[in-house]
Amino acid sequence: MLSIATLITTANVLSKGTEEILLKSSSAEFALHNNYPNPFNPTTTMRFDLPIQTDAKVIIFNMLGQKVKTFDLKGVSAGYHSVKWNARNDLGDPVGAGVYFYQLQTSNFIKTKKMVLLK
């Protein structure tokens, strides 16, 4: 734990506080967060948390359930992570405007969220 005084001193501000803040370096559970921005054009960021080191995939699907883009992530450390998508498919071609779904998959966790690409 670091006190606010320690954090403020590190930031070169001459002020003191008495509260303490717990800074976590890794997540206690799997999580897939809302992408940002949403809607987006031309890129968006998808954030996720892993409590353990594991292989993970972030897969983007179109409205028909077809895979558009796969981020195959091997041996990802425990902690907070993000993947940026540039609205291109696995072949590098731009995709059309519309609703897409992004899914985080590990051996222990699957979660899907919705995003919108505007053109």
Image (cartoon, rainbow, N blue to C red):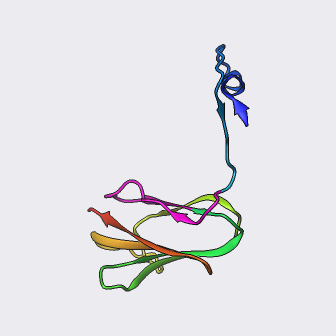
x then y, percent, for residue 110: 51, 77
- Residue 23 horizontal side relative to residue 41, left or right: right
Tell me which residue sits at (68%, 20%) in the image.
Answer: 12
Tell me which residue sits at (48%, 79%) in the image.
Answer: 90
- Residue 63 horizontal side relative to residue 15, left or right: left
Q: Please say whether residue 28 is one of the residues in the magenta stretch.
A: yes
Answer with the quarter of the image where residue 48 lies. Answer: bottom right
Between 86 and 108, the residue placed more toward the observer is 108
Q: Please say whether residue 95 is one of the residues in the magenta stretch.
A: no
Q: Which residues are magenta?
A: 27-48
- Residue 118 horizontal side relative to residue 89, left or right: left
x then y, percent, for residue 13: 64, 17
Between 107 and 71, the residue placed more toward the observer is 107
Tell me which residue sits at (69%, 50%) in the image.
Answer: 25
Between 119 and 59, the residue placed more toward the observer is 59
Between 17 and 63, the residue placed more toward the observer is 17
Answer with the quarter of the image where residue 116 lies. Answer: bottom left
How many numbered marks appear?
0
116 to 54, vertically: above or below = above
Say whether residue 87 is visible: yes
x then y, percent, for residue 72: 59, 77
* Quadrant the N terminus occupies: top right
Say whether residue 73 is visible: no
**Could you tell me what secondary structure mostly forms the magenta stretch?**
loop
Answer with the quarter of the image where residue 50 lies. Answer: bottom right
* Quadrant the C terminus occupies: bottom left
- Residue 82 horizontal side relative to residue 28, left or right: left
49 to 54, vertically: above or below = above
